[in-house]
Image (cartoon, helix red, strand yellow):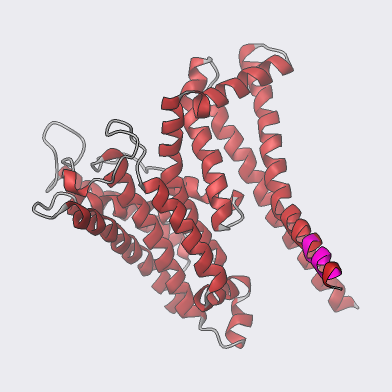
């Protein structure tokens, strides 16, 4: 009897894993398949030669050399934070496109707090990261509050907050913390920098491990706590959640605050660990927007976000090397675009299936 129960649980687990992984895997394979045709067209090659050239370039640019592998880890780190930020919002049924602005505010917080002299190293680093969390949380709380209390569209509000964040950051970078002769802020103090565990000259830093630990904590929060249960319940069906006694407005605000805090922490870690200053922005950093694709491919699951961050970070890192092989780097963006289309198609397919089930129940 016990063995039969265990077999049933294993079958259910395998079926669940198959449902979750099927579309992302198909998306990745199909995207690479299409990319090969662009390589064939660009370099006038046959299919197998084009495939070998493309995969060689991506492999070399991602893992082929020590320097490239390190830059891949650097590219992966901010995507973990922005992917997690989007995943929390998606789980609540929200589209927090303002992760980009919250990431920028986290960068600004790190650039400001990182210049305060006289603070011992461990405390200074903690204050920098905490500043990023607070700045990002406040920046997300505003559209979250408006969504919950007034019913305004969070997509429109967060887009506007992105532009405000960029201009607020530029005000400080071009003004109070400007570094003469550059388009950036002053370098943060040594006491405010995150530890680079390979060498001071190699940019990969402990921000990577902070992101991994954060993913585990977010998984625990969403699936092992009452708060997480309520957040996911609101995302599945807000009206049913309210009927069950869950305060949906409170959870919408809370989810936005958590999402913004994660993005802000990512921005602070990026400044404290990788670039050590805030740049004057003529456009968005795009880490927040790339996080949308990361969260979608990861099925809004924290562990899935870790794996999809590696994929997208690796592709972004390999874009530089593709040009060395005389392959247009835009092929990377085509691959990412096709993956997103496939993942979105998965959501549409499930929506159609659910709609048909509801109609069948009504007609029964």
Name the quadrant of the C terminus.
bottom right
Figure check: 347 above or below 358 = above
Location of residue 121 in the rendering, given as x and y in whole percent from the top left corner: 18, 51
- Judged left or right of residue 134, residue 191 is left
Q: Residue at x 46, y 34 (%)?
A: 72
Question: Residue 271: horizontal and vertical position, in percent?
Answer: 28, 45
What kind of secondary structure does the magenta stretch mostly adopt?
helix
Q: Is residue 338 above or below residue 293?
A: above
Which span of residues is magenta-colored?
A: 4-10
The residue positioned farthest toward the right in the image shown: 364
- Magenta residue check for 301: no
Quadrant in which residue 190 is drawn: top left
Q: Residue at x 45, y 76 (%)?
A: 148
Q: Quadrant of the N terminus?
A: bottom right
Residue nearer the viewer, 214 or 333: 214
Residue 92 visible? The answer is no
Q: Identify the residue at image location x=57%, y=28%.
A: 331
Q: Is residue 353 above or below residue 43?
A: below
Residue 230 lies, in percent from the top left, at: 54, 77
Image: 112 above or below 355:
above
Residue sitting nearer the eye, 58 or 153: 58
Q: Position of residue 243 (x, y in %)?
A: 61, 87
Instruction: Classify residue 60 as left or right of residue 42.
Output: left
Q: Quadrant of residue 43?
A: top right
Specify whether residue 49 is in view: yes
Residue 9 located within the stretch drawn in magenta? yes
Taking the view exactly as shown, the residue that stands out farthest to the top is 44
- Residue lying farthest front? 2
Number of marks: 0
Q: Is residue 351 left or right of residue 219?
A: right
User: What residue is rendered at 55% in x and 19% in y?
Assistant: 327
């Amino acid at each position: 009897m016990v063995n039969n129960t265990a077999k049933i649980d294993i079958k259910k687990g395998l079926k669940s894993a198959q449902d979750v992984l099927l579309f992302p895997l198909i998306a990745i394979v199909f995207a690479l398949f299409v990319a090969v045709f662009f390589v064939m067209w660009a370099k006038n090659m046959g299919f197998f030669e084009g495939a070998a050239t493309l995969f060689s370039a991506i492999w070399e640019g991602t893992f082929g050399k020590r320097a490239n592998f390190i830059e891949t880890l650097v590219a992966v780190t901010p995507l973990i934070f922005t992917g997690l930020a989007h995943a929390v919002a998606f789980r609540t049924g929200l589209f927090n496109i303002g992760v980009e602005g919250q990431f920028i505010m986290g960068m600004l917080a790190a650039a400001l707090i990182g210049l305060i002299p006289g603070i011992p190293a461990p405390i200074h680093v903690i204050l920098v990261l905490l500043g990023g969390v607070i700045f990002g949380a406040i920046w997300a709380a505003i559209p979250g509050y408006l969504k919950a209390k007034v019913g305004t569209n969070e997509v429109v509000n967060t887009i506007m907050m992105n532009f405000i964040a960029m201009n607020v950051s530029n005000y400080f970078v071009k003004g109070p913390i400007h570094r003469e002769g550059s388009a950036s802020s002053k370098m943060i103090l040594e006491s405010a920098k995150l530890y680079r565990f390979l060498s001071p000259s190699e940019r990969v830093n402990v921000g990577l491990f902070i992101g991994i630990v954060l993913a585990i904590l977010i998984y625990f929060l969403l699936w092992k706590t009452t708060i997480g249960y309520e957040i996911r319940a609101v995302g599945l069906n807000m009206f049913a959640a309210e009927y069950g006694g869950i305060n949906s407005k409170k959870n919408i605000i809370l989810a936005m605050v958590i999402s913004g805090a994660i993005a802000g922490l990512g921005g602070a870690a990026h400044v404290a660990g990788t670039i050590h200053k805030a740049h004057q922005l003529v456009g968005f950093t795009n880490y927040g927007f790339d996080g949308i694709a990361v969260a979608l491919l990861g099925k809004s699951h924290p562990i899935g976000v870790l794996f999809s961050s590696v994929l997208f970070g690796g592709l972004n890192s390999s874009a530089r090397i593709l040009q060395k092989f005389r392959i247009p780097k835009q092929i990377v963006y085509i691959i990412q675009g096709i993956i997103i289309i496939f993942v979105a198609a998965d959501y549409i397919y499930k929506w159609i299936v659910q709609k048909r089930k509801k109609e069948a129940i009504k007609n029964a």
